[in-house]
Image (cartoon, grey):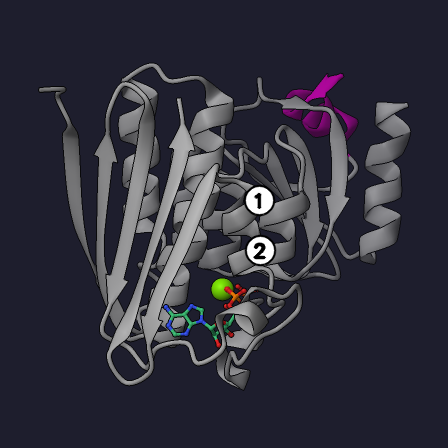
């Protein structure tokens, strides 16, 4: 088990907001459709997606997801980042495709 | 008589930036009450899917959350278009979500199945042209 802090320290992605860096990350999950993520993302996971809007955050927060990695150069607006910080959810961005980003997290996990 | 804690919410229609506020509010209340995180997660997921459905498909509605010692009951009522074929709506992947909400990530057709999966009891009462009431329980 790693924490969001481990992901920050690894420096793989650009940190946008740290939220609660002590949150555990036990798995990595990928999907852009919100209700699939809601139903299937494990709690305490890192969620890699290209869906960067307020609803992404609502899903992450309600499903106890620890951090969001926005792939393919997607970003949140400042209002979303403020909201993520308040919810204690770390947000990272990367130019990498979804799979490559997820693989990097998986390598940290195993 | 047993004490019942009740919370009421009015959900505006078509406001995607605020959608999920009621569910977040309930989540925070349950956290403060010290409920276990798995129970809170189930309630949060089920209520959010119901809340967002009211925003997307029914132009808003009301949510009542009743907490007793045995269960958390969520009652989501709207006066939207209703659901003609409930069995079909419950199928994984069935969705009538319009294009503009699909581009936000909605429309997988997994909301109602999630509500079923994360609750211990779910009932949909719907009349076309009148509205829909979804009742869900999570046992404590
Ligand atoms: N409150 C409602 N009023 C009217 N129709 C509804 C309501 N809730 C659900 N429906 C109908 O049931 C269908 C399936 O709902 P479901 O939540 O499973 O999927 P969805 O909302 O289309 O997509 P998503 O996967 O993003 O939730 C909807 O597309 C809609 O046709
Ligand atoms: Mg839905």
**Badge 2: residue crowd in 10 Å (few <14, some 14–19, many ≥20):** many
**Badge 1: residue crowd in 10 Å (few <14, some 14–19, many ≥20):** some
Provide residue A1's location: percent of width, then percent of height: 76, 16
**For the point 48% across and 40% down, which residue is it?**
B119
**Can you say whether B121 is above or below B16 in the image?**
above
Q: Are marks 1 and 2 on the same chain?
A: yes
Subunit of label 1: B
**For the point 45% across and 57% down, which residue is it?**
A54
Q: Residue B113 carries which label?
A: 2
Q: Would residue B65 be found to the left or right of residue A1 on screen?
A: left
Q: Residue B117 carries which label?
A: 1
Provide residue A73's location: percent of width, then percent of height: 70, 61
Majority secondary structure of magenta residues:
helix
The kind of secondary structure element at disc 2 is helix
**Can you say whether B68 is above or below A85 in the image?**
above
Which portion, as a residue range, is magenta? A1-11
Q: Name the quarter where the C terminus of chain B is drawn.
A: top left
**Can you say whether A89 is above or below A58 in the image?**
above
Mark 2 C-beta to ligand 1 under 8 Å: yes
Residues marked 1 and 2 touching at CB (< 8 Å): yes
Provide residue B2's location: percent of width, then percent of height: 14, 19
């Amino acid at each position: 088990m790693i924490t969001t802090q481990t992901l920050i320290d690894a420096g793989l992605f650009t940190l946008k907001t740290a939220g609660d860096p002590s949150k555990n990350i036990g798995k990595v999950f990928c999907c852009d459709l919100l209700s699939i993520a809601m139903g299937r993302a494990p709690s305490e996971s890192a969620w890699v997606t290209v869906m960067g809007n307020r609803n992404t955050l609502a899903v992450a927060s309600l499903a106890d997801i620890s951090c969001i990695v926005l792939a393919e150069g997607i970003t949140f607006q400042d209002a979303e980042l403020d909201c993520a910080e308040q919810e204690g959810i770390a947000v990272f961005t990367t130019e990498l495709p979804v799979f490559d980003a997820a693989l990097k997290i998986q390598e940290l996990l195993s | 008589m047993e004490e019942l804690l009740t919370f009421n919410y009015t959900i505006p229609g078509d406001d995607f930036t605020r959608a999920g506020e009621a569910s977040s509010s309930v989540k925070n209340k349950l956290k403060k009450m010290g409920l276990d995180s798995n129970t809170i997660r189930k309630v949060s997921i089920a209520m959010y899917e119901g809340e967002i459905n009211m925003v997307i498909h029914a132009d808003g509605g009301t949510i009542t959350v009743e907490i007793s010692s045995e269960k958390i009951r969520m009652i989501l009522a709207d006066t939207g278009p209703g659901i003609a074929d409930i069995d079909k709506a419950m199928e994984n992947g069935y969705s009538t979500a319009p294009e503009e909400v699909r581009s936000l990530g909605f429309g997988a057709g997994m909301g109602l199945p999630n509500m079923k999966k994360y609750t211990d009891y779910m009932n949909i009462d719907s009349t076309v042209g009148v509205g829909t009431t979804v009742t869900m329980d999570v046992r404590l």
